[in-house]
Image (tube, grey):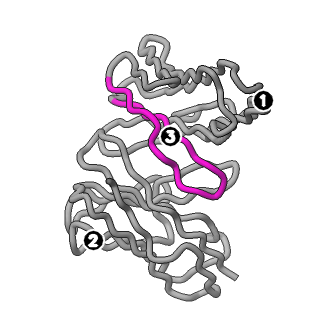
Amino acid sequence: RKEVEQDPGPFNVPEGATVAFNCTYSNSASQSFFWYRQDCRKEPKLLMSVYSSGNEDGRFTAQLNRASQYISLLIRDSKLSDSATYLCGRNAGNMLTFGGGTRLMVKP
Amino acid sequence: DVKVTQSSRYLVKRTGEKVFLECVQDMDHENMFWYRQDPGLGLRLIYFSYDVKMKEKGDIPEGYSVSREKKERFSLILESASTNQTSMYLCASSPYTGYEQYFGPGTRLTVT
């Protein structure tokens, strides 16, 4: 089993929809988690950090469930500009391990 | 504002050449990282450094070496480039262990 797993998608949603992605991890010693957004042929950009149970920033909410070993990202009121690949990363010690990413396509 | 820069956006090299990829960060971060990203394989850690002159192997260090002579600069070296090292190379830095990482724009390397 991979250390960090994500559904690759694509998730095709209409503008204004609410969409959620999950990311499962296998190392229970994981200390912190991150969601990154990556546009095509660009570098990943930090979207949100999660150090405890969750985090919220505008339309974006991350929830951490340590018992079930997953972290979710919820996007409300999707915009066309939200179309991207979303990478989940989990940190244990000095190393950050990433999932393969989930692709989101928001349609007009 | 966080700033990580990489020496080249695109690079084409021949098999057997020695290749240097440079990364500079201006945030006084302790930790620096080199990844490669390939379709279907995601981001994979090659090497990281948590201090000047210190380095640790990541998941795929074979065929690579690194150098960190100054805190702000972390170099990735391909001693003898091979076609299977054609990839997108991403450098990242992080202020402390366990904190978020910030990525440079990436170098798309093609080895022919």
Indicate the amino acid at tag 2.
Arg
- Tell me the distance, in whole angstroms, between the alpha carbons under discs 3 and 2: 26 Å
Residue B81 marker: none
Label 1 sits on residue: A12
Residue that carries the numbered disc 3 in the rendered image: A36
Q: Quadrant of residue B71?
A: bottom left
Residue B87 in the figure: left or right of residue B91? right
Q: What secondary structure is found at the residue carrying circle 3?
A: strand
Q: Are dots 3 and 2 in contact, CB under 8 Å?
A: no
Give the residue displayed 26% in from the left and 43% down from the top. B97
Residue B103 visible within the image: yes
Q: Amino acid at mark 3?
A: Tyr
Name the foreground residue: A94 vs A82.
Answer: A82
Q: Quadrant of residue B3?
A: bottom left
Vertically, is A106 above or below B37?
above
Is A16 located above or below residue B11 in the figure?
above
Please state the extent of the stretch shown in magenta in the rendering. Answer: A32-51
Foreground disc of the pair 2, 1: 1
| Chain containing the residue with disc 3 | A
Residue for badge 2: B68
Task: Same chain for labels 2 and 1? Say yes or no.
Answer: no
Q: Residue at x 22, y 55 (%)?
A: B30
